[in-house]
Amino acid sequence: MRRLLHVDYSLCIGCETCQGVCEFIHHGKPNIRIYYTMSGLPIPINCRHCEKAPCMEVCPSNAIYKDSDGAVIIDPKKCIGCLMCLAVCPFGAPSFDVRVKVVTKCDMCADRRRVGMEPACSEMCPAEAIFFGKPEEIEDEIRMRTAEKIARERISSKSLEGVGRLL
Amino acid sequence: MKGMRFAFLCKEKPEKNGKKIAIIGAGPAGLSAAGYLVCHGYDVHIYDKLPEPGGLMLFGIPEFRIPIYRVRKGYEELKNIFEVTFYPKTKVISSKKEEEGDEFVENFVEFEELVKEYDAVLIATGTWESTIPKIEGVELDGVYPALDYLFKIKSAKLGHVSWEEVPKIDGKSVVVVGAGHTAVDAAMESLLLGAERVYLVYRRTINEAPAGAYEINLLKQRGVRWLELATPVRIIGEYGKVKAIELQKCKLGEPDESGRRRPIPIEGSNFQIDVDMVVFAVGQKATPPFNEDIGIAVDKKGRIVVDSRHMTSREGVFAAGDVVIGPSKVGRAVLDGLVAAESMHMWLSGR
Ligand code: SF4
Ligand code: SF4
């Protein structure tokens, strides 16, 4: 069944919890990282598990496949470390792991999903900015959050016009 | 609308291993450590001075950043499913000492008692003491440490105190000193609570602001008056209350040890603005659960010193989070709590 792992950048507060828990379960090498833009805005970057994944299409050794939840996964035994996936990924997600000498990236916490848990980043994000689930569930949740935000604005304040989703 | 899963490392509670751990402090570091430990079969008891777990995630950071339900449902899962025992309103101390957020404390527990009672202890008490500059007028009514200011607002929002006990912000002029995340949050909460005017004063420029230019610009868009290159020199009172603040302009000099250019006050550039409240968000200090020498080393800044195993200079006493690393992001504290818990597990299982 198709699952999405979706990061809503307008809800992210840049607390780095996703990166911290990912780093912990991957022994020092997180697959989601916060980057600070020149304007000082924190942006989490990770694999978005594209439906038409360019990395998968370009991989010369067919090392990249999709599992039943739609997670795009690199098979370390087949990867030849040519970095073509990094070259075509719109987000720069694939990462060369110097320890195992192949390219690794987010596998949507495959081990956790196998036993019925969700990706660690989405379970722990304090702002609930990372969504995991069926597409329609996620979309409902996001709209619900937006509704809450609109309600809060209408109730709380006079001087807040033209704000982003954050508030 | 789900809660944070502090015990994200396991699906269900495993068999108990018979060992008991005390954690002091129920903030992000303490709760994440608890999550790790319950997933490895430990009995975990958490002592915290506040009326409910969550630390700064609930009592400092505004709810438009971290939704309240996210933290509440999170610790409820620890309590109800993973059988963590919480001792709220309980302060662990070796002798009595006051800091922000102490209002709710009803019980005191001796630190040494925990060391005796439990197989291991984790200190994750954070940084609950705000730095207030030593200038004239800081004792006036209307001067607040930022953490205390945010703490009062959040305590009311969480239903622990009535709004009567929160400083009346509606229609007031507030000046917030500082440009870190706490300063930004204090300015934003002031706006949301209807302050007439909000000033943010910083001694460097927007480019050096620790909260980042984006956050500052967002506040400016919402009407906050940004006064950069200025530093407070005194607060002027009338009948014991804040009436105005005197600021001095600065220029940037050579870089200091932090790598940022040092602000140098300019003689004779003083000016005043009329305000009702002054909120200082210029830093916080570590607050370990002791204030005398009990054999646990602290550094110059009062932070607990730990070795590579996260153990303090006392065998079996570990520390993690802001009380070790100083004020940091939630994620940094979470990671630190996890790493410390893992190391406690190693130590207790003789590895
Ligand atoms: S945990 Fe959530 S809020 Fe924090 S940085 Fe990651 S996505 Fe952003
Ligand atoms: S690695 Fe890049 S291209 Fe491949 S699925 Fe992830 S985001 Fe898409």
Image (tube, coloured by chain):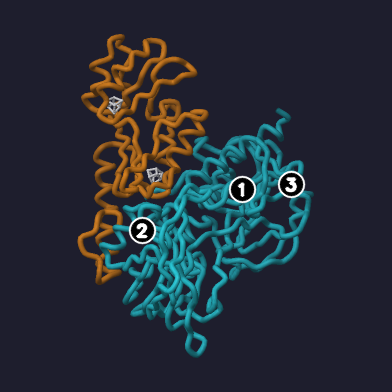
Chain colours: A orange, B cyan
The mark lying in front, picked from 1 and 2, is: 1
Name the residue tied to disc 3. B118
Mark yes or no: residue B159 visible.
no
Q: Is residue A106 left or right of residue A144?
A: right
Q: Residue B192 in the image: x percent, y percent?
A: 33, 68
Name the residue tied to disc 2. B64
Q: Residue under mark 3: which chain is it in?
A: B
At horizontal 71% and vertical 44% (from top left) the residue drawn is: B312
Work out whether mark 1 precedes mark 2 in sequence or the reverse, and give the earlier one. Answer: 2
Q: Is residue B328 left or right of residue A42?
A: right
Residue type at the position of mark 1: Val
Q: Quadrant of the C terminus of chain B?
A: top right
Work out whether mark 3 precedes mark 1 in sequence or the reverse, and give the earlier one. Answer: 3
Question: CA–CA distance between discs 3 and 1?
Answer: 21 Å
Name the residue tied to disc 1. B324
Residue A20: give its label. none
Residue type at the position of mark 2: Phe
At horizontal 43% and vertical 67% (from top left) the residue drawn is: B266
